[in-house]
């Protein structure tokens, strides 16, 4: 059975946002996976930095890439089981010596075993919980008639928002809408529900625009 067309939309939304950025810089490796010598996920799928604030990135960290290469990078990350997270935190410009924080946005491709932030999500407090937002217009539903209660999505939910109750998975209110459960469920029991893609992109660009301008040359 083929998956619903909406399953691939989150990746296309990320690709569309990246395609609008004036500059795209990709790190040669993931800092977290390199630090902890990750054995479960590729180290060479590094974060992306967007916007003209990247123009002071030292070439020893990575390289500038085309929009086409960026789309291929995003696809490779998705196939490796990594989840894209947009980030705008003070540690990024400090770590790389960048001054144009208002023209800079990072996309991290996070795993569950070595990420300095993600590995603490299941035991998160209120501040860390606020750091990960669900994109407005996205929701996940469980098709109970298809769920076998195998527990795969429960184990792989980085937010710890899934439990098996009476043999069927139940989703908690803190679901981040990443869509991983949809991709990994062997019974295709998870359904990703989305508003119109153009609406979602506009909402995301509006949210990004409140903290960083990655579009203006």
Image: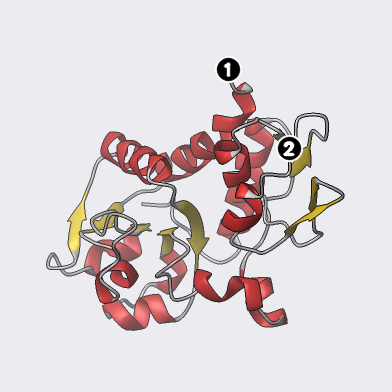
**Mark 1: few, some, or many residues within 10 Å (few <14, many ≥20)?**
few
Query: Which dot marks residue 88?
Result: none
The tag on residue 2 is 1
Cα–Cα span, label 1 and label 2: 19 Å
Q: Quadrant of residue 122?
A: bottom right
Nearer to us in this view, 103 or 35: 35
Q: Nearer the viewer, residue 189 or 217?
A: 189
Placement of the N terminus among the 4 image quadrants: top right
13 relative to 62, above or below: above
Image side of residue 143 versus residue 123, left or right: right
Q: Quadrant of residue 76?
A: top left
Q: Secondary structure at mark 1?
A: loop
Name the disc covering residue 148, or none. Answer: 2
Farthest right residue? 166
**Residue in view at x 43 percent, y 70 percent:** 115
Dot 2 falls on a residue whose secondary structure is loop
Please say if 117 is above or below 74. below
């Amino acid at each position: 059975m083929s998956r619903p067309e909406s399953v691939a939309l989150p990746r296309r939304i990320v690709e569309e946002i990246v395609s609008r950025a004036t500059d795209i810089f990709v790190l040669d490796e993931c800092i977290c996976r390199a630090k902890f010598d990750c054995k479960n996920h590729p180290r060479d799928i590094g974060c992306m930095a967007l916007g003209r604030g990247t123009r002071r990135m030292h070439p020893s960290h990575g390289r500038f890439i085309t929009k086409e290469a960026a789309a291929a990078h995003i696809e490779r990350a998705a196939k490796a089981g990594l989840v894209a997270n947009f980030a705008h935190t003070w540690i990024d410009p400090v770590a790389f010596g960048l001054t144009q924080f208002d023209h800079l946005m990072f996309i991290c491709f996070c795993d569950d075993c070595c990420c300095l932030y993600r590995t603490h999500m299941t035991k998160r407090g209120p501040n860390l919980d606020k750091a990960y937002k669900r994109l407005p217009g996205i929701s996940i539903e469980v098709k109970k008639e298809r769920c076998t209660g195998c527990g795969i999505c429960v184990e792989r939910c980085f937010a710890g928002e899934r439990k098996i109750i009476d043999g069927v998975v139940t989703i908690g209110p803190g679901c981040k809408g990443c869509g991983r459960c949809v991709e990994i469920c062997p019974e295709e029991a998870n359904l990703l529900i989305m508003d119109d893609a153009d609406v979602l992109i506009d909402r995301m660009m509006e949210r990004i625009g409140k903290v960083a301008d990655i579009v203006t040359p």
